Image (cartoon, rainbow, N blue to C red):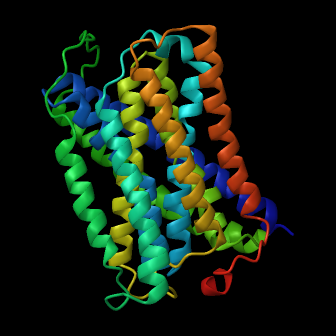
Amino acid sequence: MWAYPVSLLSYVVVAAIVVFLSIKLSDFVDLLDKKTNLSGALLGSILLAAVTSLPELFTSITATVLIHDNSLVLGNILGSDIFNITLFAIVYIFFFKKLATSKVGKFHLITLMFVGIFYAVTTIASFVFDFRGILWGWFNPMSIAIVIIYAICVWKTPKIEEPDDEEEDASKLTVKQIALLFTLFAILLIGASIGITYLTSWVVDVYGFGSTFGGALFLGVATSLPEMTSTINLCKKKNFNAAYGNILGSCTFNFIILALADALSFNTKTTLYKADQSSFFLLILGGFSLLIALISILMTLSKSFRATIAYRIIFITFGILLIGTYVTFLVLSNIDLGLWFAPYSV
């Protein structure tokens, strides 16, 4: 009986460490933004997103290389993405007034389009290539498509610094010192990420959760908490471009992790894109969340968008729908619906 509280408590402690380290890394990236001439868009949607996605990267590699459980990886990435998209609910429900008086860049629509393409490619990889056995050994050819699409996404990301009010940098740290601290905290984050992967596997075994559901709930949520904290802080500062870039950039980076894990999964029990009921719902409901995000961003970019009661009601509704979609996934994943492809996951 001791395994129940100890496993869960250990998970919570290490998850808190992951959050702390990820926030510190985000702070260092912010300092680099102020102390260098690198594009804010590049640092926000590419570098910051990659930094806060380090937990997903190393938990996925650990699950594939050390634990040999690919089902944790698919649940981790798709669960993390749907959780990230749900973060728009925080913006719409708690920061609507600030959003209505701020500017949001059109390039977020391009990033959102790429996230949708990634979802489509992952669906094809699972229900066409993997299901039909169209593989190169253990490797799914669609992983190459993911790498190519991500490269195009990075190429399309704005590199030129956008004119904005510069904030005074109060830090006395030099760029070299920031880089050294960044490296140190990144190494600590890698260790914590590896630890939380093992703890997730332990919790899943102790409580009897399904592997994909366990990966989506415990790995997906824990490794997405840094994005949530960053989003809240950026919204408080009315920096919605950075907040949106962090959310969507993390989603795109997560899919490149799938391709990497697929390449390293030669010694695992199952292929990486082997679908089960949980991953099916993650793909369907994740696509629905993307549709809500798309409509809401289009409305945000509209010239008529104002802090009116009508718009407030609409955006709060969007937020509730996003939260409801995530809760729906959690509920449906714990109910055996006897879907036709269920035997395929065994």
Residue 2 appears at what percent x and percent y?
Answer: 83, 67
* Placement of 157 over or under 149, stated as above or below: above
Question: Which of the pair 231/331 is nearer the observer?
Answer: 331
* Placement of 308 over or under 246, stated as above or below: above
Residue 62 left/right relative to 332 = left
What residue sits 42% from the left and 71% below the top?
124
The quarter in which the C terminus is drawn is bottom right
The quarter holding residue 49 reads: top left
What residue sits 36% from the left and 87% below the top?
135
Residue 232 appears at what percent x and percent y?
Answer: 52, 26
Q: Residue furthest right?
A: 1
Residue 213 appears at what percent x and percent y?
Answer: 66, 65
Residue 119 left/right relative to 218 = left
Q: Is residue 67 in view from this perspective?
A: yes
What residue sits 60% from the left and 53% below the top?
285
The quarter holding residue 58 reads: bottom left
Question: Which of the pair 248/14 is nearer the observer?
Answer: 248
Residue 157 appears at what percent x and percent y?
Answer: 22, 39
* Placement of 150 over or under 109, stated as above or below: below
Q: Is residue 53 in view from this perspective?
A: no
